[in-house]
Image: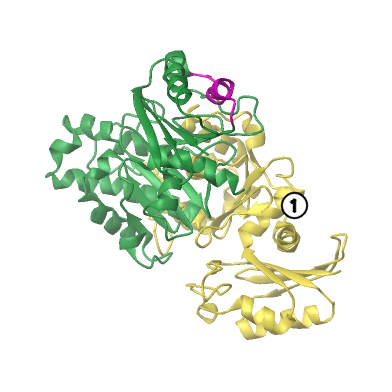
Chain colours: A green, B yellow
Amino acid sequence: MNIGAIEAGGTKFVCAVADESGKITAKTTFPTEDPETTFQNVQRFFGDHQIHALGIGSFGPVDLDKSSNTYGSILNTPKTKWKNYDVLGRLKKDLQIPIFIDTDVNAAALAEYQYGAGRDVSSCMYITVGTGIGAGFVQNGKTYIGKSHPEMGHILVRQHASDQFAGNCPYHGNCLEGLASGPAIEKRYGKKGIELADAQHVWELEAFYLAQAIMNYFLILSPERVILGGGVMKQGQLYPLVRKKFLELVNDYVAVDDMETFIVAPELDDEQGIRGAMELVRSADNV
Amino acid sequence: MNIGAIEAGGTKFVCAVADESGKITAKTTFPTEDPETTFQNVQRFFGDHQIHALGIGSFGPVDLDKSSNTYGSILNTPKTKWKNYDVLGRLKKDLQIPIFIDTDVNAAALAEYQYGAGRDVSSCMYITVGTGIGAGFVQNGKTYIGKSHPEMGHILVRQHASDQFAGNCPYHGNCLEGLASGPAIEKRYGKKGIELADAQHVWELEAFYLAQAIMNYFLILSPERVILGGGVMKQGQLYPLVRKKFLELVNDYVAVDDMETFIVAPELDDEQGIRGAMELVRSADNV
């Protein structure tokens, strides 16, 4: 039995097919255009491969409230052609197979939980720090969804006294994403993060924001492990800085056994999104 | 079949017995002393009533990691006689019946979910703002526990520019509890909250902190309803202030249908703790 998967991102779609053993046998990537063009590309790809179920990890916000009339639709997004677009309905109509949808970050968390940096724990978060900031959470093999899906990247953090940047979140200005995403770094310093690799103060400040966010996630969700990924985290010097600031903030109020295994890097390179989308089908089978 | 319940607080223990219909047939309250004296009082009370199972909502931090050797024990607490005390083990030894333990705030959230202000939704938080600040969360009839239980009262919030109070949390200084608990209000103004009922600026500031916390809980857990209780919330003027500031902060990024039914007062007066402890037994039966 073949399983299909879509990693539906704001800039590109990745589609893949895996055989029963989980081995990926076909894969393609194309840019995210208007929904009609995009789903024609999706249908063309899967038309060549007989799949029996599909998992999709979607950009958001997407309605994941199963009791809602618009379950599986994109909600309020700056990508106007996608606003209110019924992704799940379109795929069901085109493919006529069981389809399981979740956020892109929940899918990534699920893949890391099953096969990657979270495979030896009972719960983990996957935080992506890149163009935006988002996070997914998995406990006992199930992704976490509330009334709708969390939007953890937009929590409030305290701005550092030395940081005069107004933040670039269109909704909240200086929320976490507004202060610590890749574009926020670029806008604050006029250079991309990768060009600032040796500027210690840049990463001290970045760690100051990420550690605050992880403290709040930790006190609210109590995850066993926190996996920090995304483009900004390619700056590996961030990990020890984040661990150090997190420890200072929590101040032993809640014990963490070993910081080296509590805040870690992902292990699935940039494959966690598509592998997680595939895993949505498998984990649903086990419900 | 009689069910027993304990609301184990830092200053008092409430014990109760209910019959099969859920009606409370006996109840007692005594101060929390050293564990030995306290559990002798517990045993004396339940010795007079044949109970078949017991639920306990405990002050914390308490180890709720079922894979831990110290599951059911109090952890790091300023109450030195209780530190590392095996509450669950002691009760099992004394009573020889099935016992279900959770935090006091999770128990309260469960009672409000089943019978109170959350009875018409699929998930709700119960936040208590009193001597300390804590919160419990229930989704689909189950209380939320992570690796261990959340400690949501200690999340970081932004201090208002006009507020020079250092905060009174012994661990974090100006975390949420350090800035917005009852003792924080009293220490900041030199008067108890109840004496400041007419001081509008006091409640504007309090709402500023609570709204930030609720925004973060909302973006991380996506609860369908937020129930705000505890001694400080007896100042009913806080509810509209918190709703207003929450809306300003979220800025329509995630839609909330109706603020009046999103942030609400509890409905079980001060009974949610003991009723929730009882409910822990019933909800466990349905697993």
Specify whether A162 is left or right of B150.
left
Magenta stretch prevailing secondary structure: helix
Specify whether B218 is left or right of A212.
right
Specify whether B286 is left or right of A119.
right
Q: Viewer-proximal residue, B67 or B199?
A: B67
Dividing the picture into quadrants, the one containing residue A98 is top right
Image coordinates for residue B157, horizontal then vertical, percent: 42, 47
Specify whether B163 is left or right of A192.
right
Q: Viewer-proximal residue, A235 or A142?
A: A142
Q: Identity of the amino acid at label 1?
A: Leu
Magenta stretch in the rendered image: A83-97
Q: Is residue A88 magenta?
A: yes
Residue at 27% across, 48% down? A207
Dividing the picture into quadrants, the one containing residue A73 is top right
Q: Chain of mark 1?
A: B
Q: Which residue is labeled 1 in the image? A: B268
